[in-house]
Amino acid sequence: MAAKKLLVVDDDSNLLEFLQTKLRSADYEVKTALSGNDAVKMVRDEGYDLCVVDMRLADGNGISVMHEFHSMDPHMPVIILTGFGSVESAVDAMKKGAFSYLTKPLDARELMVQIDKALENRRLNYEVHRLQGL
């Protein structure tokens, strides 16, 4: 089975490097973007199985970037990261379409659990739609 393609978007290059190394060691194909604009172009050009997006980016916010992603692929799970977490912002992100919401400092194990859950959810949804089409 081919490695799942992940995109991680954050304006912190150190965090991107850490996550890229961690996720590649778990056999994911990982690309990174430092801006929302770059990430949107990458999703448009390449397509991804899942995206991890920081809530606050230098050129916008993670929710608007997530909406751009979902306009191209409505079923792609997006995990939102933030250093400014609150219950209200987590609920808001989930209502707006985020699969999950994690706060920084990031627990890499929890991120891996959420990625695995999101990809399994995507696979199951695909299977349901495939079976309904029969």
Image: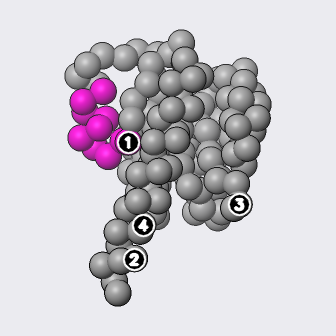
Viewer-closest of 64 and 122 = 122
Residue type beneath disc 4: Tyr
Q: Which residues are magenta?
A: 90-99
Q: Which residue is mark 4?
A: 126
Q: Residue 97 lies in magenta, yes or no? A: yes
Residue at the disc numbered 3 = 2
**Where is residue 21, by image quadrant?**
top right
Of marks 4 and 3, which one's residue comes earlier in the chain? 3
- Determine whether, in the image, residue 51 is placed left or right of residue 75: right
Question: Is 103 within the magenta?
Answer: no
Label 2, secondary structure: give it.
helix
Q: Measure how far apart labels 1 and 4 are at the Cα level.
A: 16 Å
Depth check: 75 or 68 in front?
Answer: 75
Q: Residues within 10 Å of mark 3 (few under 14, many from 20)?
A: few
Identify the residue position indicated by label 1 in the image. 99
Identity of the residue drawn at 59% across and 56% down: 48
- Which residue occupies the foreground of this view, 134 or 95? 134
Tags 4 and 2 in contact by the CB under 8 Å rule?
yes
Q: Earlier in the sequence, mark 2 or mark 1?
A: 1
**x, y percentage for residue 129?**
35, 73
Q: Is 34 placed left or right of 113 in the picture? A: right
Q: Are marks 3 and 2 in contact (CB under 8 Å)?
A: no
Picture disc at residue 130: 2
| Image: 69 above or below 63 | below
